[in-house]
Image (spheres, rainbow, N blue to C red):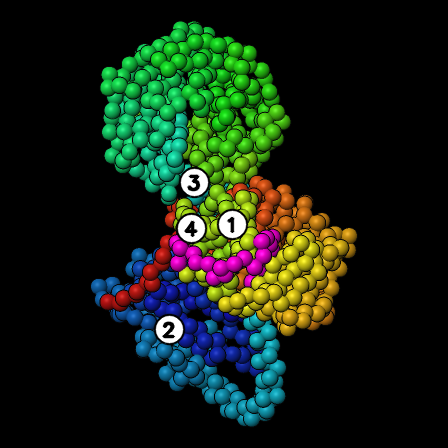
Amino acid sequence: MEQVGDRAHRHDVFISYSHQLDDGPATAFQAAVEHFGRPFYRSRDLRVFRDKTNLSASPHLWADIEEALGQSAWLIVMASPKAAESAWVRKEIAWWLENRGSDRILIALTAGTIVWDAARSDFDWERTDCLPRGELAGAFTHEPRWVDLAWLRDRTRISPRHPELVQAVAEFVAPVRGRTKEELIGAHLRRQLRFRQTVTVIGVVLSVLSVVSVVSAVRAEQESDRAAERQLVATSRQLVAEAASIQDTQPDLARQLLVQAYRMAPTAQAHGALVASAAIPDVLPTNGSSHGVAYCPFGGVLASAADDGATLYSTDGNRRLGLVGTEKGSATAVAFGEDCGVLAVGDAFGHVRLWSVSRADEPRLVSTVRPDDGGVGGLAFIGRTLRLAVITDGAVPHIVDFEKPDAKVTDSLPGTALASSNETIAVNPDGTLVAASFEAGKVRLMSVTDEGRLTVKSTTTSPSRALAFSPDGQFLAAGGEENSARLWDVSNPSRPRQAALLSARSFLGIDSVAFSTSGKSLATGAGDGTIQLWDMTDPLRPAQGARLTGHSGTVRDLAFAPDGRTLASAASDGATRAADGSDDLNGTVRLWRVAEAERSSSRVFLPEGHMSGQPFGKDGHVLALGSPSTLWWVDGAAQPYRLSTLTTFNQGGQQVSFGPDGRTLATGTPLKMWDTSDPLDPRELTTTALRQGAEIVLFSPDGDLVAADEDDRLGLWSTGDEPRRLALLPTAARSPAVFLDEGRSLAAVTRARDAVQVWDVSTPSAPRKAATLRTGAARPTSLAASDGTLYVGDSHGAVTAWRVRGDRADRLGSSTRHSTAVEDLAVHPEGATAASSGADGSVRIWDVSDTENLRESAVLTVGAGTDGMAFSPDGHTLAVSTGGATYMWEAEPSTIQQQLCAHSEPITPEQWDQYVPDRPYSPPCIERKPTVETSA
């Protein structure tokens, strides 16, 4: 809407037109009317309301238009074929005729034809095509006042003083003002003369005020831009918060909101949320209820059991590979053989089928056995054989032998009529012990012989809906009707004893349990859809970890990936109404990234650790780890692979650092230089060790120096063909160290561990003390630098920025977000982002664009204390290592956004209106092509 004049008073004129065709003429006409209708003597200005409503706008805008019509004395219709078709123009004319009559309607022809039939006192509607016939037929008793403005359409710019336009406008303004056309034109000419006489004086004043006006305009525009930017930032932050709140229940929508948040305002908070977005679970929909899930022991393939059969997925991108169908009934359980070449599938009618899945995209049926006519509640392979332990309705355990072509049941034990409705079975890792549901609240432990015979060892009162052995076979986890799980020590299966009780914050009982392959984590799934992770480092004192809350229905099965980094959960997540009116259950398999008993947002995992602060080759394609000393190819690979191994005298590994050229590598034990131009075959540059051991190995930015620790000293070494030690600096033993100021300075912790000493090493053979940074009661524990800014992490969990200039160090911003000592620090190559890690296993991303105000933008988790952290040289990757593992995050926003878009459905218009209501629908993950307008 646009209004000229004071809205509190009535309008003289309301202009109605079609914006699709008449916007240009209407604008020029309005300007001329306002200019020509200026007051005579002390009379008031002529007030004009021009309806600029978009034809696609919402109907609720009619209230504003109706109010403007009610405040106007005259209606000017910009007549054209488009206006005649416009619903808004027709509605405005109809209102006017009903409430004002036709005697105050003026017509301006902008396109088309107007023909008045005097004999009929009406328009000739056979030839008139620019007025709405339904509204204006018979509305006039005599020909209305109208002017021809069609010539305006060919003019891109026109002055309101144009003589032809003045004549046309005077025709309309005369009745509005109550004066003759001649009086108006005469007054207009006299006003023009007075205007010319004052131009000279005004010009002088304007020249004086021009500078002030320009400055004010610039400031106003800048303030307007800042206000718009603040609004975008606020909306971006809101979208990040909304995404966090729905990421488990609506992961696709959460991904879309994160992309839109960064698209609206690329703030540090939005960037941090993108980096952490891999924590959002992946969802694999199933046809009907989802009953079971299993990983191939070697990785690479995931199987799920649902109403339409068993589906095989690739774990690289979650691609669907193939479907293993069932004759009738749903697949109720799945299990992979030890070598991943076979898959066993049980169904609701008691069939157990063995499939060859060596080619997962072309599964082949090998054999079928039906132990009895009861549905299969669970099955598991026995050791490395093709024998399976199977349980069917009534808690009947069987041993099914697929070792020979004539598959058969080798043994079965009686069940019980008192069995629970959810039977399950589990086999210990070496295949000698079977645990199975019995009566409700009881578990049978049975030994199994090489011939496939079962012998009951004991029957234990215990929850029995879900059973799982620990990887070492010592413990059995059991869940059931209770809202807790029990851990049994089954070292002596004849006399199992309860080792621990795991009380979860869940309801409706425990329906699934699973150990990670390391045995350090346990997951329990409940009837209320929640999953609880447990830290089993001390099995006698399990500790609660993360709680996962994405499912809305019973979690029927759980399985950890072989690397322990992903947890798959199968559940029925609610019911929808099918076409026949029945309830159609919707199952899903959710894939959660985990780090032991905590959630993880790391997409890439390496089973080795001990990383230096300079672990990347020049392009970030190669990563060097010290435990053991290996080179890995990590460029864009979801599953990195080992390239080569470097020799070392230390079984615990060594420090390994790349020089700035990305080819030269230094190892610490012994201290040697390597050429890794061919990372598959590294070549020693130093034939003899410079030193037998160094815990710290660090290159200067220009690559001319290497700093390596020697007990409580730090040695400076040249890096030429014959490296030699140039100087020794007194430092704390194993002190963190970092070069800054383009390599002219070196910072390290003092021997007393109460300060950071900066050394001037511009002359490496004669270093001298420069600035000293006092950290108070906290001990400095980690260092990182960007240009002249030094970042210090301390034992109290604080990260502090210091400006170092020669002998002076000024303390800038500081933030204490870690609850434990800061173990590692790293700064992004562009200098605006930093990362820190604590002994509690948390990794925090920082916005350090303002070094006086360090702001946390994201929190990541690795589940354990760290021993190395670094950004890749191109800034695309953040790597963090623990004692025995390395976690990697994508840090480049554009790459993350592409990944989020690839793994989610576009946001719908309804969702957009809910979360971004003040902006037109524009899905962030759909490439928009430019619109090409054509005219007839």
User: Where residue 648 is drawn, which disc sits there?
Assistant: 1
- In three-dimensional space, the C-alpha distance between marks 1 and 2, rounded to whole angstroms, equals 84 Å
Amino acid type at circle 1 is Thr
Label whose residue precedes the other's in the sequence (2 or 3): 2
Q: Residue at x 35, y 13 (%)?
A: 451
Q: The residue tagged with tag 4: helix, strand or loop?
A: strand
User: Where residue 559 is drawn, which disc sits there?
Assistant: none
The reply to whether discs 2 and 3 touch (Cβ–Cβ < 8 Å) is no
> Which class describes the residues within 10 Å of circle 3: few (<14), some (14-19), or many (20+)?
many
Label whose residue precedes the other's in the sequence (1 or 3): 3
Label whose residue precedes the other's in the sequence (4 or 2): 2
Question: Bounds of the magenta span?
Answer: 678-701
State the predominant SS element of the stretch in magenta: loop
Q: Residue at x 69, y 71 (%)?
A: 806
Q: Residue under label 4, please give it.
A: 644
Q: Is residue 582 visible?
A: no
Q: x%, y% of residue 491?
A: 53, 18
Q: The residue tagged with tag 1: helix, strand or loop?
A: loop
> Which class describes the residues within 10 Å of circle 4: few (<14), some (14-19), or many (20+)?
some
> Which class describes the residues within 10 Å of circle 1: few (<14), some (14-19), or many (20+)?
many
> Which class describes the residues within 10 Å of circle 2: few (<14), some (14-19), or many (20+)?
many
Is residue 228 found left or right of 370 in the rendered image? right
Q: Residue under label 2, please give it.
A: 25
Label 4 or label 1, whichever lies nearer to me, is: 1
Toward the front, the furthest residue is 688
The reply to whether discs 4 and 2 touch (Cβ–Cβ < 8 Å) is no
Is residue 222 found left or right of 774 in the rendered image? left
Label 4 or label 2, whichever lies nearer to me, is: 4
Q: Residue under label 3, please give it.
A: 282
- In three-dimensional space, the C-alpha distance between marks 4 and 1, rounded to whole angstroms, equals 13 Å
Residue 197 in which image quadrant: bottom right
